[in-house]
Amino acid sequence: MMKALRLRMVDEEYARHEQAYLNFLAQGKKRSGRYLKPIYNTFKKFFDYEKWLEKANNKQSPKTTSHSKKFEGIGALLKKGEK
């Protein structure tokens, strides 16, 4: 029972650190001339809920999908280079 409690506490600590990291990302700034502008000026730019829902319904990982689109045509280029 004590092991379960310790594991739960580790999970809670992980969630707190993850939230702190997301807060750090959301407060990110970029330089625009003399001024600093927020990187994410809307919540939708920070987290596109509809996009994640759509990918969840298609049972695809959002990270996997972005990688597959990025490297979509590389196979053809590699085959072309072999000839």
Image: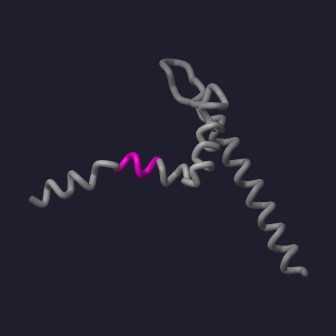
Magenta residue check for 69: yes
Residue occupying the point 13% across, 60% down:
82
Residue sitting farthest toward the right: 1
Q: Position of residue 67 (x, y in %)?
A: 43, 51
In the rendered view, does 71 fall on the left or right side of 5?
left
Q: Which residue: 54% across, 49% down?
A: 62
Position in image of residue 48 (x %, y %): 62, 36
Q: Residue furthest top?
A: 34
State the residue in front, 6 or 31: 6
70 left or right, relative to 26: left
> 35 and 43: which one is in front?
43
| Horizontal and vertical percent position of residue 18 | 70, 53
**Is residue 65 shown in magenta?**
no
Residue 30 % position (x, y):
53, 29
Residue 15 in the figure: left or right of residue 30? right
Residue 15's quadrant in the figure?
bottom right
Location of the N terminus by quadrant is: bottom right
74 lies above or below 43: below
The relative height of residue 30 versus residue 34 in the rendered view (above or below) is: below
To which quarter of the image does residue 43 belong?
A: top right
Residue at (77% x, 64% y) in the render: 11
Residue placed most toward the observer, 10 or 60: 60
x 9%, y 59%: residue: 83
Q: Which residues are magenta?
A: 66-71
Query: Magenta region, mostly helix, strand or loop?
Result: helix
Q: Does residue 21 appear left or right of residue 36 in this picture?
A: right
